[in-house]
Amino acid sequence: MSTPEAPVSAVKVRFAPSPTGFLHIGGARTALFNWMYARAQGGKFVLRVEDTDLERSRPEFEKEIMDSMAWLGLTWDELYKQSDRFGLYRDHAEKLVAGGKAFRDGTAVILKVDKARDIKFDDLIRGLIVFNTDEIKDQVLMKSDGSPAYSFSCVVDDALMGITHVIRGEDHISNTPKQILMYEAMGFKVPKFGHLPLIMGTDGARLSKRFGAVAVSDYRKEGFIPEGLVNYLMLLGWSPGGDQEIIAMKNAVAKFSIKKINKTAAQFNMEKLKWVNAQYIKALTAKQLAVLAVPVLKEEGLLADGFDPAWLERVLELYKSRMSTLRELVERAGFLFTDDFKVSDEVRAAQLTRVMPKEFALLADHLEKAEPFDVVTTEKIFRGVVAGLGIPMGEMVHPVRVALTGDHVGPGLFDTMSVLGKARTLARLRAAFV
């Protein structure tokens, strides 16, 4: 079992997205690990919107990022926007010029970098990292258009906001020595740094849209639930120990240790994500699942206002162990919500030629007398008809299932009949060969 670090007083971390695009999986994992570390240490989690790129920053992206974080349960304690803080950056740049540590180049402000010096920092995840300043050129602090450079605004904000730990992706490692020089020039305390490994696709290449590098909001639309997605993101580089893969957020926070994050790249696997999500769906009651499923079904035009909640819960009880996402409910159980469903030519050829129309008509006539129209009664009648025809059960079960559902696999046939109801069951049997 992994052991959390001893609590550090006044731990404060931040997640600092740029609103130039939607919140993607890599960013969400960075936010999650920052949030978990803050909660594990009794500290604070800051959301800082880094919108200094005024041309590319968009309010719709900012809203999507915040909505996605809230949906994932990553609530923040403080919120800042860098576009509100330009005056602070200018003031600190001017102080550096006045102190002889920076110089002007037209309207830009540049930090002087002394050469032949090692910059060392003990990365929380990777250990000691060393850069030589011979590899670092003089750093732009304020651009000629009056906006701050990325690293400079980060340093000013992290210092003034009291950020104690900067946990971010490994693509920022090369920024760290430059930022340490800025901390030192301004006389600020240097925070601790931890750089998370990249997320790779199953092909070993950097994650691309083909392997899941899409927005969190896309996963939401695809029918993943927040607890499932968060649980999976935790496993991309960290483990609660003991081969445990399904873990509630509260328990994960209690076990979380940033020093236990892997140094090597994590591999994104869509099938594993679906498996994790399926475990959470299975654990929900039908009533809880209905709250999540109704918006998806309505969006697809399969459910209207005034639907029967009890009937929907029966449907969900029947399918929740067969779903890995809410969207799969539409794909697998759509026949229960509409009579306009398709039977593929392949399935029709394989299944609906086995039984003649008269056998279907006979079954429908007998089922019409079923009272109540439940699992026990329909199965008894079905078996009686099959016995009377002198054919194996399988020769009747599969074609009937296709006629009722459009597919040759699914939940138990008699469970399906019961949920479908007598009227629609009979209508579909009688229309199968029309």
Image (tube, grey):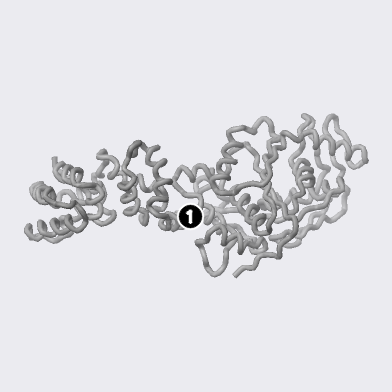
Which image quarter: residue 259?
A: bottom right
Q: Residue at x 57, y 62 (%)?
A: 251
Q: Which residue is mark 1?
A: 273
Q: Residue at x 83, y 52 (%)?
A: 189
Which image quarter: residue 297?
A: top left
Q: In this image, 249 relative to 278: left or right? A: right
Q: In this image, 347 relative to 151: left or right? A: left
Q: Quadrant of the C terminus?
A: top left
Q: Position of residue 393 (x, y in %)?
A: 15, 60
Q: Nearer the viewer, residue 143 or 40?
A: 40
Q: Nearer the viewer, residue 259 or 299?
A: 299
Q: Position of residue 3 (x, y in %)?
A: 64, 68
From this viewpoint, is residue 346 visible? no
Residue type for callout 1:
Leu
In the rendered view, tell whether residue 26 sits above or below residue 82: below
Packing grade of label 1 (10 A; few <14, some 14-19, many >=20) is many
Q: Position of residue 415 (x, y in %)?
A: 25, 55
Q: Nearer the viewer, residue 310 or 187?
A: 310
Looking at the image, how many numbered discs can be counted on the residues?
Answer: 1
Q: Secondary structure at mark 1?
A: helix
Q: In this image, 424 relative to 101: left or right? A: left
Q: Quadrant of the N terminus?
A: bottom right
From this viewpoint, is residue 172 visible? yes
Q: Nearer the viewer, residue 354 or 92?
A: 92
In the rendered view, tell whether residue 27 sits above or below residue 90: below
Q: Position of residue 400 (x, y in %)?
A: 18, 51
Q: Residue at x 52, y 66 (%)?
A: 244
